[in-house]
Amino acid sequence: MNANRRIVLASRPAGAASADNFRLESVPVPEPRPGQVLVRHHYLSLDPYMRGRMNDAKSYAPPQPLGEVMVGGTAGEVIASRHPAFRAGERVVGMGGWQEFALVDEPEQALERVDTTHVPLSAYLGPVGMPGITAWYGLSMILRPKPGETLVVSAASGAVGSVVGQLAKWRGCRVVGFAGGPAKCDYAVRELGFDACIDYKAAHDARSLDAALAAAAPAGVDACFENVGGRCLDATLGRMNAFGRIALCGLIAGFEAGPVPITNPGPILRARLAVQGFIIFEHRELWPWAVSELASAVAAGRLRYRETIAEGLERAPAAFLGLLRGENFGKQLVRLA
Amino acid sequence: MNANRRIVLASRPAGAASADNFRLESVPVPEPRPGQVLVRHHYLSLDPYMRGRMNDAKSYAPPQPLGEVMVGGTAGEVIASRHPAFRAGERVVGMGGWQEFALVDEPEQALERVDTTHVPLSAYLGPVGMPGITAWYGLSMILRPKPGETLVVSAASGAVGSVVGQLAKWRGCRVVGFAGGPAKCDYAVRELGFDACIDYKAAHDARSLDAALAAAAPAGVDACFENVGGRCLDATLGRMNAFGRIALCGLIAGFEAGPVPITNPGPILRARLAVQGFIIFEHRELWPWAVSELASAVAAGRLRYRETIAEGLERAPAAFLGLLRGENFGKQLVRLA
């Protein structure tokens, strides 16, 4: 425990991200000064938003600085505290970054104590953490689906999509997913309870994707939770019912190869759609409401989720690049302790 | 007055609309039966939405039937009435279509009496009619700009855009237009009071259009009233500020050559934009509020507008095709009497 291994952004991607953009470093584990706590990370969360931060582009957040520890959500344990409100042994979630230990200033702002009696620690990075809260917010605050409406969600088996679909089922919707490959689609239908899940990789052109969606959503689409963009969004737009809503949560299709257009924006006008982009970090005031519903559902075994766990910090870059290619299945984590 | 000349849809366009899609017919002027009135049209309004109706495609309204009189807004005079609430000589506005006379059932629903004491009859098809109300609704109900915000409107010198810009100026916005050619841009700035107007025809690529918008909107764009789509929308999206709003009113760029994509939807997510499509015919309950503000402003000479008037029904198809190519200047009308 004398070394803190960490991964910094070594260079910005020109095109697709690669392992060369990251650098593993080893530095001494710091000692907390008064008011600080030292956290040992058990899990690092890997999420698509990180790809956006690697670019030096105008966005809602400043770019990840070069040479500094990659940003990232973490779950771990306080191992030393010089803050009166924290004790060693407490389980906490924060934005500790891609490293094994984190020294935390102002821990009352930066850390959230979590109760692992009935909810596993890792779930606080998945269904009960940022991805689950993202699903809850987009569904409850933007899409507001009514019972009987049809909802489409892309990246259906992913950390966000899997929660969107289950919450929408509980709210009485017909739920149709898009996912890549038969295993993810089977999982969405059999384990998560989706009404249908379309394997977009099996649909080789826009026409066949549209036909698959028409069959899965015979009454059209009222609400779309969009994580991906590109051809699935194009197909969904063409099937939207009047006054439909689209919550734009992610556009992972455009992260690597450059922007993926909306081929035909006509339905936004003709169907009088409302399209709303959102960033979950801006809605902290609602997180407790979301966590309350999500934690109860996980504790009760009602909210299902799946994790892909890479072992060891050194595997984080490869796992992250795999996430961008859709190779993970469910929430992508890195185990650090 | 024994013949009613009318234009029907002869065929649906395959690609761009052409004069062949229309047929001029002459039929006897009908006699009103009990409960009906006969209206002689003075003006026919030509509007982009008509192009959408010519296609046999799913939209908010059923397609224009083949062989029937083209849909269209009209302003005219009651010349014979067998309805107790209407008298010959009254000025009325309705959806009489591309014809010189219209027999109107249920005139209390289908016709609006208008006061031409201080407002010219033709203005009820322009700034005080559907285009002006469209501008008022999108601005007041969707964009809701605050003083000091920057608003962009495409087709700036058109029937809708010219009203959007003037209303936004009165609400304290910086207003930037897009229009085709120096004459329309000069008009928007000098006559309508826009802060700037960009001649998109003079910007030969995306980079120069973006540079022109960056110069005209140095604080970014908070609200966009979109009538056109395509490259102006692409440029605007790239300059939108956080929590910006886009009212999607028209996509005339895609009417003829097929859908024009949104090249990069990324800003909708990154800037957390709200994009809302709307159809003014669905918000009739608000029309009196809009007309009240618009009619006062026209009567006072404060709301400026410009008309392009084709003489005679037989010129309606050519005028309409010109409208789709942006050849009109301001509101396109056809004088029928």
Image (spheres, coloured by chain):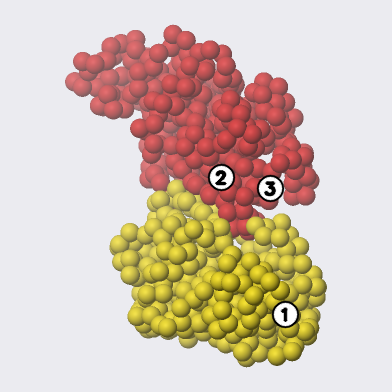
Chain colours: A red, B yellow
Q: Residue at x 46, y 43 (%)?
A: A278
Q: Pointer 3: what residue?
A: A239
The three-letter code of the residue at mark 1 reads: Glu
Against B193, residue A129 (above or below) is above
The image's mark for residue B31 is: 1
Q: Residue at x 44, y 41 (%)?
A: A279
Quick one: SS at disc 1?
A: loop
Task: Kindly indicate the quadrant of the structure image that contains residue B223.
Answer: bottom left
Nearer the observer, A157 or A47: A157
Nearer the observer, B284 or A262: B284
Residue A230 pos. (x, y %):
63, 48
Q: Is residue A216 left or right of residue B198?
A: right
Q: Are marks 2 and 3 in contact (CB under 8 Å)?
A: no
Q: Is residue A27 left or right of residue B57?
A: left
The three-letter code of the residue at mark 3 reads: Arg
Quick one: SS at disc 2?
A: strand
Give the distance between the C-alpha atoms of the residues marked 2 and 3, in whole angstroms.
12 Å
Q: Residue at x 65, y 42 (%)?
A: A221
Q: Is residue B78 left or right of residue B304?
A: right
The image's mark for residue A246 is: 2
